[in-house]
Image (spheres, rainbow, N blue to C red):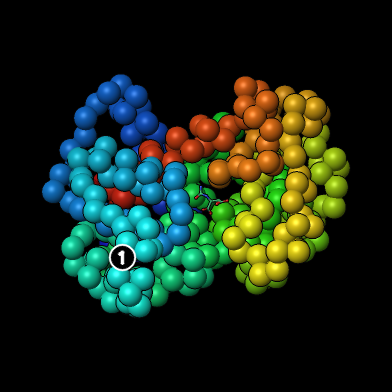
Amino acid sequence: MLKGKSLVNIDDVATDDIFEIFKLASEYKKKVSKGEVLSELNGKIMATLFFEPSTRTRLSFESAMHRLGGSVITVSEAKSSSASKGETIADTIRMASSYSDIVVMRHPMEGAARLASEFSSVPVLNGGDGSGQHPTQTILDLFTIWEKFGRIEGLNVSLVGDLKYGRTVHSLIKALSRFENAINLISPEILQMPEHVLSGIKNQQNIRKISNLEDVLNRSDVFYVTRIQKERFVDMNDYAKVIGSYSFDLATVSRMKESAIIMHPLPRVDEINPEVDSDKRALYFTQASNGVFVRMAIISMILGVR
Ligand code: NCD
């Protein structure tokens, strides 16, 4: 049951609830594509507090709320809120939660969403906390895999790129490893998946560090490519060493299985050449548009109307 709950870490969501979200997201996807106008969240208000840049996450949450007939109040820039005057997260969230029925927050500090959920009088959805977690992104990632393969188990999944700072992969690996999936980790040496993420995972035997992408290119079902998180580097000399580490072009993609899919949470920088976009294996734009339907499902379950 998600009703009334905050969603800070992917571990907060039971597997049964993940499948409930999939069902409801599919239903909403059909309804929206038929042009149905929904009103189940009439009178409800969502506050979106984004203290870090965002395009897809904020817009898809806001679109989801509007599609359900609710409304949105927003802070889209740290400098336009009282955080820039030194207000604490605790005080900001106390106020925002008294103005709304549900809060979505993105913040550069790992742990910020957990802290916010402790001071909030309404459910808090973590829209990304530093290098921590991004649970709703993970649910929409899983939904995209489920739509394509009809399952989220028995797959060979390669996570590629910045596995150290990328929060989407920190949540995703936890969710994928609840099921029997072979997971390959492919990253530059200095951007490996942190031990604190790996140590919390049960099926460790299904996870392998791979040094060469070529080794899994014709074997993986899912390639989940990520951006090098430039903004999180402490030393820009380190960033210079890893720029352009992975670059998927049509030549790379032609060596993949016909049935494979390429995902990316976006924004991409240079990891995937735009020439790949028209290949049928490129699923990142579908993935991004699924964000609205999955978030509609999550919001309406948390607010208890479904
Ligand atoms: C990601 C994020 O913010 O963690 N973007 C997103 O939410 N879709 C990935 C990224 O910024 O690289």
- Seen at 80% across and 37% down, the residue is 217
**Image x and y of residue 75, in percent:** 31, 58
Judge by depth and name the residue closer to the eye, 292 or 191. Answer: 191
**Image x and y of residue 103, in percent:** 30, 60
- Seen at 24% across and 66% down, the residue is 97
- Residue carrying label 1: 81
Quadrant occupied by the N terminus: bottom left
Kindly identify the amino acid type of the residue bearing the numbered disc 1: Ser
Q: Image height check: is 13 above or below 262?
A: below
**Image x and y of residue 227, in percent:** 64, 49
Q: Image height check: is 252 above or below 61?
A: above
**Is 276 positioned to the left or the right of 65 in the image?**
right
State whether label 1 is within 8 Å of ligand 1.
no
Judge by depth and name the residue closer to the eye, 75 or 170. Answer: 75
* Displayed quadrant of residue 146: top right
* Displayed quadrant of residue 289: top left
**Is 153 positioned to the left or the right of 61 in the image?**
right
**Is 130 positioned to the left or the right of 101 in the image?**
right
